[in-house]
């Protein structure tokens, strides 16, 4: 059948191809938490998380400075609504956030590279029952990721101890145990 004569059929084929590509990429990257050598970005050159200049805000406009995070274990996930792997890993980040929701010593921060209006306009912002954040310009240069999603884990001293670009199952037992270990290490 000649799809040039049927533009609607061409559009349908293109949409199906895009969905298959997105599904295939999700299957490839859904292998879970990766080992220390695979899929990691170069860790950003910075002194400490609390020393970064800049702030980020929730979707209601309440600002937080990086200095406010001193003494906490912090998971910073950089993402965007237009990014399929970012959207795919959000339920795992939400589950991780829920596991540590009552623990003041750990923060899970999903900070979008978009504006608050762009995030608010996406249906996911209403579906997730967790706080979402955006950078208050300018974005600290140390957190300008080359790819999305990119996630960094900071220990209680504010040092980057782990970085990963690409989707991961952030609520898995291995990462939860790792974060609990970081929490325990700073308790002394």
Image (cartoon, grey):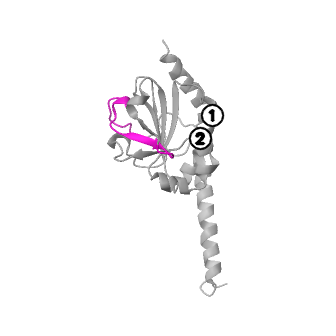
168 lies above or below 17: above
Does residue 32 show up?
no
Counting from the top left corner in percent of width and height, residue 147 is at 44, 49
Residue ID at (47%, 45%): 61
Q: What secondary structure is marked by label 1?
A: helix
Q: Earlier in the sequence, mark 1 or mark 2?
A: 1
Q: Which quadrant, please, contains the N terminus?
A: bottom right
- Give neighbour class at mark 1: few <14, some 14-19, many 20+ (Cα, 10 Å): some
Q: Which residue is mark 2?
A: 130
Q: Which residue is mark 1?
A: 98
Q: Which residues are magenta?
A: 41-61
Magenta-drawn stretch contains 74: no
Q: What secondary structure is marked by label 2?
A: loop
Counting from the top left corner in percent of width and height, residue 125 is at 58, 50
Which residue is nearer to you in this view: 44 or 59?
A: 59
**Residue at far right of view:** 1
């Amino acid at each position: 059948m000649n799809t040039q004569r049927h533009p609607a059929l061409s559009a349908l084929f293109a949409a199906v191809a895009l969905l298959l590509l997105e599904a295939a990429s999700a299957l490839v990257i859904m292998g879970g938490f990766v080992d220390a050598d695979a899929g990691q970005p170069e860790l950003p050159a910075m002194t400490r998380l609390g020393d970064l200049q800049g702030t980020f805000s929730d979707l209601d406009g309440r600002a937080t400075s990086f200095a406010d995070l001193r003494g906490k274990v912090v998971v910073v996930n950089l993402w965007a609504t237009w990014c399929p792997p970012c959207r795919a890993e959000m339920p795992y980040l939400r589950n991780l956030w829920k596991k540590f929701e009552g623990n003041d010593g750990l923060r899970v921060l999903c900070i979008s590279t978009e504006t608050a209006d762009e995030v608010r306009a996406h249906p996911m912002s209403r579906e997730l029952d967790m706080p979402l954040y955006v950078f208050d310009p300018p974005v600290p240069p140390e957190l300008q990721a080359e790819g999305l999603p990119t996630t960094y884990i900071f220990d209680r001293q504010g040092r980057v101890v782990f970085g990963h670009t690409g989707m991961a199952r952030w609520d898995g037992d291995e990462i939860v145990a790792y974060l609990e270990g970081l929490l325990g290490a700073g308790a002394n």
